[in-house]
Image: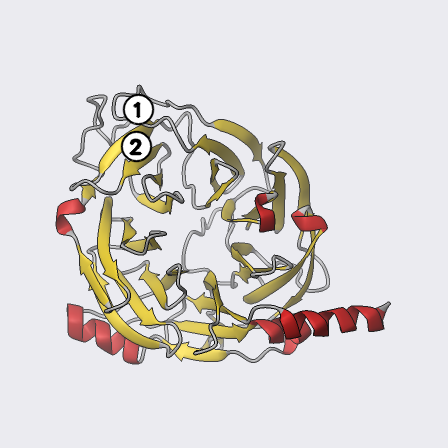
Amino acid sequence: MKILYVLLIVIYVIFAKDYEVWVMDQSDTTTDGGGTVYIYDGAELLLNANQAVPEVLDLGGSARNLCLNQTGSAPKRPHMIFFNVAQTHAIISFVTTGHVLFMDAATRTPLNCIDVGVQAHAAVPSHDESFVVVANQAGKLLQKIITNYAINSFVLDASATLNLVTCVTPNGVPCESESLRPNNQPICPAIDSTDSKVFVTLAGGGLFVVDPHPSPMQIIGEYDNTTVHANGCGASEAQGRMYINSGGPLESDLYSFPLTGYAPTNPVNVPSPRLVFTHDGSISDSHGMLITKYERFVWIAERFGNTITIVNVETEEVVEQMSLVGNVSQDPAPDIMAISPSGNRVFVALRGPRPLTQNNPAFNNSVGATPGLGVIRVQLGGEKGVFFARTTITNVVNGVETADPHGVGVRVIEEED
């Protein structure tokens, strides 16, 4: 059986799409920030993940210098990474500063750096490649960058900015209010496949559905914090629904939103989402999310409990709560995830012993013992998985391990790369 398995792996490596996995370590590489991107070859992760040797990009080098030259300030703490649809560009947001960095993904060359203001938590590209939506978290702004990847043009569209503190919803109520949405820091925007709706999770609970095309962007759906709980940062579209999580220490929820029925004239919480699951306790703290191949299952990472909750998309029922604790790691703290092009591997960021973001010291919900990139073998089309390998990412400063992986992205490599 072992020989057959190895043969199948070799055949797969020969005929599958080439791809690479990018994972970002948030820890500093310079006195004023930086951070590191580790880029792993997909075939190497498949054949011998524990010994995979990454390409290392120090964001405290040419990327930092570009940002200094173009914005007058240095970027700090690379947090999230996305690729445009054509896979030609990487988009990196820095959560301690307001920088959004655009890189040529093939040459690893930093091209443009935009400072949106206080804090760029996530910068998500549209499917038509014409814009990027930025969650300026501490600034409580939803912002838009106009993009043209063919000519490397990236421009902040100030007229499109939606101020989530001063705005008023179409129902005539303040966007931010103590009773409905007490803290409108935008966390993770999710753009639907038609680019007509952006689902925006909020730190204090509640949610906005936004039309990204008017200037300023327009709210077409509003939800209060009793309907959608706080701190969601996971969203994936599957089979005509948008799945969105919420969570924090001791809480995890998953909501299923329709993709139609939104209008400024709708009352609050319409169209209504379905609550797929809610669970509280030590296993709970949902963050990363993905959809498996053929849109059959939703995977939700739970940092605090070291588990992945798996939901059947068709039935919207939990089918598995997969523990990652075992020989590979006794405390992996799984976070952001990405899936291979074939759908047979899931890659997950494993947090470090001194997490730099999203940790509540009362619980240490984001603390992990083995910072690196975890590799999970997908089974039964996504209904189950086996956590079988991990890479090690380290950044020891004065004898202290400071590495803290977070953002993960999978990029398909074209032949000309």
- In the rendered view, tell whether residue 186 sits above or below residue 268: below
- Residue closest to the eye, 356 or 389: 389
Q: Are marks 1 and 2 in contact (CB under 8 Å)?
A: yes
Residue annotated with mark 1: 179
Residue visible at 16% across and 52% down in the picture: 157
- In the rendered view, tell whether residue 273 sits above or below residue 70: above
Residue 394 is left or right of residue 172, and the answer is right
- In the rendered view, tell whether residue 161 sits above or below residue 14: above
User: Dot 2, how many residues are within 10 Å of its Cα: few (below 14), some (14-19), or many (20+)?
Assistant: some
Which residue is at the far left?
A: 159
Residue 147 is situated, as x and y percent measured from the top left of the image, at 25, 59
* Tag 1: amino acid: Ser
Q: Say what secondary structure mark 1 lies in.
A: loop
- Residue closest to the eye, 62 or 145: 145
* Tag 2: amino acid: Pro
The part of the image, by quadrant, that contains residue 107 is bottom left
